[in-house]
Image (cartoon, grey):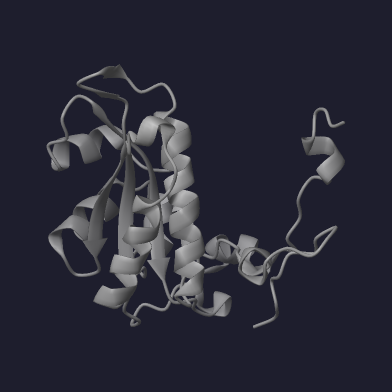
Amino acid sequence: MSSRNAVTSVPIHPLLAARHSTRALDPDAEVTDGQLQAILEAARWAPSAGNSQPSRFIVGRRGGEAFKKILAALNPGNQGWAKNAAVLIVAVRQFKNDRGPLPTSAYDLGQAMAHLTVQVLAEGLTVRQMSGFKPEQVSLDFSLSGDLEPIAVAAIGVKGDPADLPDDLRGPDDSPRARRELDHLVLHSD
């Protein structure tokens, strides 16, 4: 497999340069209890407004009931490759608590998922996050309270070989990585 490291305008941390979302996951590889705990612990220590900690997670390991429910809630195109993940995690935001609305809860959950992503990479694993799932099905299947909203699903595992994917799923894994130029993203800078 060739390197998929990002070609950046300035050097960035090697974990961030190496990060990419693959659909090719080893269907036999496992995530250890220690790795999973470290991944979730990294998410727990992400910053949040007023230390509100609005991030919640539903964790399913391959072969378990939670995994099967999460997989069933994915759009069909995601099911084809995500079934090979060792772990599926639903990222859930608590958008209000006993003090009222949590207006930055989506941002805070994003921070938690970013921390989770970096820890996944530090553990020698890979993660692909997706929005292609049925949040209402997850809410029903896991009896979520009305203040909780499923936002995304993360598939975590060991990188597999993209050549093992069917042609219709392999495309992004074979394509060059590209991003908009930094000047396009920065709206104003002194």
Quadrant occupied by the N terminus: bottom right
Residue at 38 percent across and 30 percent down: it is 50
Residue 132 location in percent, x, y? 43, 43
User: In the image, is residue 179 above or below residue 8?
Assistant: above
Report the side of 35 relative to 125 (left or right).
Answer: left
Q: Is residue 144 above or below residue 64?
A: above
Question: In front here: 163 or 63?
Answer: 63
Residue 82 makes an appearance in the image? no
Check the picture and name the quadrant holding the C terminus. Answer: top right
Seen at 43% across and 57% down, the residue is: 116
Query: Seen in the image, is 140 located left or right of residue 179?
Result: left
Q: Position of residue 181 (x, y in %)?
A: 84, 46
User: Which of the pair 3/55 is nearer the observer?
Assistant: 55
Q: Residue at x 63, y 63 (%)?
A: 16
User: What is the quadrant of residue 184 in the picture?
Assistant: top right
Above or below 107: residue 41? below
43 to 13, vertically: above or below: above
Seen as rendered, the residue at the extreme top is: 100
- Which x, y percent locates residue 155? 39, 60
Identify the residue at horizontal 76%, vertical 55% (top origin): 178
Q: Nearer the viewer, residue 99 or 12?
A: 99
Outermost residue, front side:
50
Front residue of 72/37: it is 37
* Residue 14 in the figure: left or right of residue 133: right
All told, the count of numbered labels is 0
Is residue 5 rendered to the left or right of residue 64? right
- Specify whether residue 94 is in view: yes
> How far from the left and from the top, in percent, is residue 2?
70, 81
